[in-house]
Structure formats: C-alpha cells, structure tokens
Amino acid sequence: MFRRFQLARLVDKVPDGDDWLFEMKFDGYRCEAELFGSKVTLYSRGGHDWTGIFSHLVPAFQKLTKGSASIDGEVVAIDDEGRASFNLLQNSLKRKAPIVFYAFDLLEQDGEDLRGLPLIERKDRLEALLGERRPTDPIQFSSHIIGHGQEVFERMCASGHEGVIAKRLNARYQSGDRSPTWLKVKCTKRQEFLVVGWRTNEEGEDLRAFHLAEEIEGKLVYRGRVGSGITDRERPGFLGAVELIEVDEPVLAVPREERKLGRWVEPRLVADVAFTEVTEEGTLRHPSFKGIRVR
C-alpha cells in the first residue's frame, strides 16, 4: 500500500537547537519501498509503481525481512567524489547501472503503523531493520547528526553537496504534508552571466525568461535560461531594454529547441543568477534571477 510522503519546506536559514537532527539532502528520486515477505513494490513520489525501473534494488530489499515494512528514502547515484549526482542518476537509469537507495524513515513494520512515533524512534527501528551495512550495499541507512545544524550545513556546502534536511527529533510522520517539522536548506551558487536573448510567450509579445551565456577563454558558452525570480512588474521594463539591443541571430550556438520562442540581443546586459549546479549538458540547474546590470 502506497503511503503519501511527508515533504520538507524550503527555508533560507538552518534551524538552531538540539531538538533537530540533520541529514544530507540527496539529489535523486524520492522512493517508497513496500515490503511484504518476498514481494517488493517501489513507488515514486507520485505513487507510481517504479519497481521495474529500480529492479536491481529488489533482491536487496527481499533479504531485509520475512515480514512487512514500509521504508521512505531516496534513490541516488554517487559520483567519484562521493556526491549524489542527479545527472549521473539519470544516466544510470538509462544504462541500468548501479544506484543506491538511502533509507531515512520507517513508516510501517509487521503490521504496525509507526507514523505516530517520534522520528528518532522510527530511525532507530529502521537502523535495526537494515542491520550492519557495507559501503557497497545497494541499500544504505541515511545517517544524521543531532544539533550543530549550521556547522553541518556549511560542511555540506563546502563538500559540494546540495544541502541539508532538518527534522524535529520527536515529530510524527505527516503523510502528504509540507510541515514545519521537516525543513530543507539548499546550498546555492551565485554568478553573473551575459544575457544573449530572451524567451517570449507563444504570441511573441512578452518576456518570459533570459537566455544566458558564460564567457570562457574569450568564447561564449550557452548556459540555458532563467525565468524564475523575474516578477510581472519587472517584465515590461526588461522587454523594453532588450528590444533596444535586439539582433537577428544569436551571437553563439544555442539548442535548436530554444530558437522557436527565442529572440536575441547583443551581450550588453549582465544577469545575477543563483543556481545549484551546471549540468553535464552545460546548462544551469534550478536557476533563479536576482538582478541585472549594464555591462
């Protein structure tokens, strides 16, 4: 039986106090493992049956218990530097390459609904269920640190990880809620990029996003587009500004699919953008517009 996930609220500040525990924020696919004897069903965040997609995890789950269990976790791929990589995970799924399930909560065990228990008790029972884990095992326990949240966050960011999840030690599991007992704090990068164009709506009458480029060794490299963070109040002024420097063709190579709704400019404007990483395709992941200036 699929149980709706508890979701974390995105916040800007790490909570203080020893009544919080902190886990790594994984960059992967949320997954629920429903075990009933040798039968294993793996569900996506939307409740879809992804057992076939994650089929190489099934034998490991079959060895965990002869009874029943419902385990909340994240399917990730770990790169050579020990970081969870969403790009690597997508490529791993295409090649059916090894991936890892990080288990961080136990919702049911042998017919007992555990969601009303304190989190720390659920995690203790989960760790006991998993037993001792080898580094090469496809199922791993998501370890945590109690307190010291800001220090944990800073170390995660310095190591190139995505961020932390903060959880109240004694909180119950709230299926379907984005409650204040689970908080996520993301590590973000921030950089300036040249504006090389803008994306219109289907009618070609509005500015929906800026096309971005980075100058590397004297050459412009396309970095995708940013629309999040641009307010409706700002759009008319930005549209007027880019129309003054419009050119017929982009000043660099851009993906074919971007040309349909793309309009192009001389690279005279510089956008301040926050983002989480540059993908293997060379574009920004989770970009957010912060401001603009004249070059």
Image (spheres, rainbow, N blue to C red):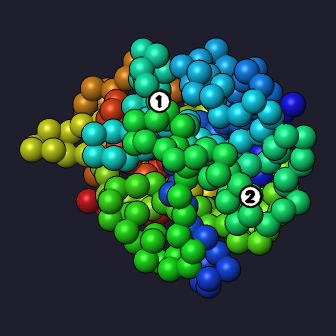
- The N terminus lies in quadrant: top right
Number of residues whose C-alpha sits closer than 10 Å to that of mark 1, classed few (under 14), some (14–19) or many (20 or more): many
Q: Position of residue 228 (x, y in %)?
A: 56, 50
Residue at x 54%, y 63% (from the top left corner): 144
- Amino acid bearing label 1: Ile
Residue in front for this viewpoint, 222 or 187: 187
Q: Is residue 123 left or right of residue 260?
A: right
Q: Considering only vertical position in the picture, is 146 above or below 50?
A: below
Number of residues whose C-alpha sits closer than 10 Å to that of mark 2, classed few (under 14), some (14–19) or many (20 or more): many
Mark nearer the N terminus (1 vs 2):
1
Q: Spatial distance from mark 1 to mark 2, Cα to Cα?
A: 24 Å
Q: Considering only vertical position in the picture, is 101 above or below 123?
A: above
Q: Position of residue 17 (x, y in %)?
A: 62, 85
Residue in front for this viewpoint, 135 or 188: 135
| Residue 272 visible to an observer of this rendering | no
Q: Is residue 90 left or right of residue 250?
A: right
Q: Considering only vertical position in the picture, is 125 above or below 260?
A: below
Q: Which residue is mark 2?
A: 122
Residue at x 77%, y 25% (from the top left corner): 37
Residue in front for this viewpoint, 245 or 190: 190
Q: Quadrant of residue 73?
A: top right
- The C terminus lies in quadrant: bottom left
Q: Which residue is mark 1?
A: 99
| Residue 157 visible to an observer of this rendering | yes
